């Protein structure tokens, strides 16, 4: 069962998305801030990371740069999750090192397609 690290500071979003992913057969671990996300990427070795971009401690852009810049975690695919839906936001996420981008509120079918493509 693939392991997904969900880095999300909003408890309601974290709970809802983790339950929906678990029902689809994913092992979901969670971090509530960017620094914890970086730490858990190293300790948990997830198969994929869902990264909120607006996070406390360090934001999702910086957390992504740190994860992608590390030898141990640099190959983990990261999907940016953000309420910001402008083209410049997508470009900023991709420039930080994200492998894909999705907007909130999450549309599960679309997100699952992206997850499955990156895990293939």
Image (cartoon, helix red, strand yellow):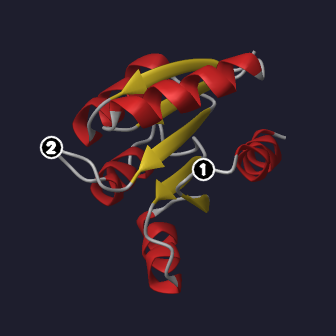
| Kind of element beneath mark 1 | loop
Residue 99 horizontal/vertical position (percent): 61, 58
Separation (CA) of disc 1 from disc 2: 23 Å
Mark 2 nearby-residue class (10 Å; few <14, some 14–19, many ≥20) = few
- Furthest-left residue in view? 57
Residue identified by numbered label 1 = 106
Q: Along the polypeptide, which appears first: circle 1 or circle 2?
A: 2
Q: Is residue 72 in view from this perspective?
A: no
Query: Where residue 9 is drawn, which disc sits there?
Result: none
Residue 95 horizontal/vertical position (percent): 46, 73
User: Residue 83, relative to residue 20: is it above or below?
Assistant: below
| Kind of element beneath mark 2 | loop
Viewer-closest of 13 and 74: 13
User: Residue 31, relative to residue 9: is it above or below?
Assistant: above
The answer to whether the residue labelled 1 contacts the one labelled 2, judged by CB atoms less than 8 Å apart, is no
Q: Quadrant of the N terminus?
A: top right
Q: Quadrant of residue 84?
A: bottom left
At x 44%, y 62%, the residue is 83
Residue identified by numbered label 2 = 57
């Amino acid at each position: 069962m693939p392991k997904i690290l969900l880095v999300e500071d909003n408890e309601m979003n974290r709970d809802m998305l983790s339950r929906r992913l678990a029902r689809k057969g994913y092992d979901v671990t969670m971090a509530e801030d960017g620094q914890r996300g970086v730490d858990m990427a190293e300790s948990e070795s997830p198969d994929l990371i869902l990264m909120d971009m607006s996070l406390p401690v360090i934001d999702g852009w910086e957390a992504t740069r740190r994860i992608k810049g590390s030898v141990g975690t640099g190959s983990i695919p990261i999907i940016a999750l953000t309420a910001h839906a402008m083209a410049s936001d997508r470009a900023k996420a991709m420039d930080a090192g994200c492998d894909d981008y999705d907007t909130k509120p999450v549309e599960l079918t679309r997100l699952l397609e992206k997850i499955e493509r990156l895990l293939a």
